[in-house]
């Protein structure tokens, strides 16, 4: 005869985990949302989840930082370009997080800037004394090359106001060598040496003033020395002169817009700045 099955009602919590065979409870047997309140915190481990089983069932923002163990998220778990600037907290990335030398290899570089204001990370090349501790990176590069400051807590930056930059070292392109000096040295303005020569044959100079006329009349801006003879007086003087030297003193005449106190090429002013 067929056997009869009897159903027995079970009280809550009367069926223990040990009484349930492995894989006996499938997802189809569990209603949506039926067990959420009955799962203790941290009771479901990674080993209990099938690959990809929980992705669609995790609500946005339900996994907080406190639920993620330290070092649990490895580089392999982060998708390409998943972390953007908006995910990085302000000032979270410090020099300690950057490769050695990153961002410091340009310290001491001098740039020209087209405004009187300074770009971020630069000091004006105006000879100022600045803090050795605040600008320790720059001090490590230039030291006291441009001035010792107060001798203990400050140092001087280069003073490049109204100054042209020139390459250090010797120039041997032409037959004559020209020296730009060593880095950090200055040279005052200069005009290259030259000679002006004039050759003339024997000739006669005429001169006159309000009282006299004739040969070799005196002029207050001329002076001469040598051997010669002068005959006559007043308007009847006759002179023969040779082996003489004559000096003339010239003054500068500002006869054009280009006359000035220095020799310079055409140029435009910029702000020289140094990276710190």
Image: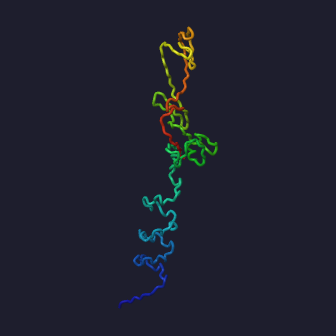
Q: In this view, does 199 lie above or below 13?
A: above
Q: Is residue 208 above or below residue 32?
A: above
Tell me: 174 left or right of 232: left
Residue farthest to the top?
231
Question: How many discs appear?
Answer: 0
**Residue 116, how many percent across, how many down?**
52, 45
**Residue 266, how many percent across, how many down?**
47, 35
Quarter residue 173 falls in: top left
The answer to which of 217 and 187 lies nearer the viewer is 217
**Residue 104, how many percent across, how many down?**
52, 48
The answer to which of 173 and 166 lies nearer the viewer is 166
Residue farthest to the bottom?
1
Quarter residue 126 falls in: top right
Residue farthest to the left?
1
**Residue 48, how many percent across, how many down?**
45, 71
Q: How is the image coloured?
A: rainbow
Q: Quadrant of the N terminus?
A: bottom left
The answer to which of 208 and 87 lies nearer the viewer is 208
The answer to which of 276 and 71 lies nearer the viewer is 276
Residue at position x 55%, y 33% in the image:
188
Q: Is residue 209 above or below residue 50?
A: above
């Amino acid at each position: 005869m067929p056997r009869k099955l009897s159903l027995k009602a079970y009280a809550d919590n009367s069926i223990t985990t040990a009484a349930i065979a492995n894989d006996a409870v499938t997802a189809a047997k569990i209603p949506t949302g039926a067990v959420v309140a009955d799962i203790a915190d941290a009771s479901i481990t990674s080993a209990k989840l099938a690959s990809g089983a929980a992705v669609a069932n995790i609500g946005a923002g339900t996994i907080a930082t406190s639920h993620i163990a330290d070092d649990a998220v490895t580089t392999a778990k982060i998708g390409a370009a998943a972390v953007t600037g908006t995910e990085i907290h302000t000032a979270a990335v410090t020099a300690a997080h950057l490769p050695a030398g990153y961002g410091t290899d340009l310290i001491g570089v001098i740039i020209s800037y087209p405004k009187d204001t300074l770009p971020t990370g630069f000091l004006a090349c105006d000879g100022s004394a600045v803090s050795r501790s605040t600008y320790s990176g720059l001090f490590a590069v230039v030291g006291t090359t441009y001035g010792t400051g107060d001798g203990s807590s400050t140092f001087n930056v280069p003073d490049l106001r109204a100054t042209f930059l020139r390459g250090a070292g010797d120039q041997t392109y032409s037959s004559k060598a020209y020296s730009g000096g060593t880095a950090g040295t200055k040279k005052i303005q200069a005009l290259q040496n030259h000679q002006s020569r004039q050759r003339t044959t024997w000739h006669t100079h005429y001169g006159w003033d309000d009282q006299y006329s004739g040969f070799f009349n005196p002029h207050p801006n001329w002076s001469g020395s040598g051997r010669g003879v002068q005959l006559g007086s007043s308007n009847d003087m006759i002179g023969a002169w040779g082996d003489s030297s004559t000096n003339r003193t010239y003054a500068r005449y500002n006869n054009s817009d280009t006359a000035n106190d220095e020799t310079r090429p055409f140029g435009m002013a910029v702000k020289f700045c140094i990276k710190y």
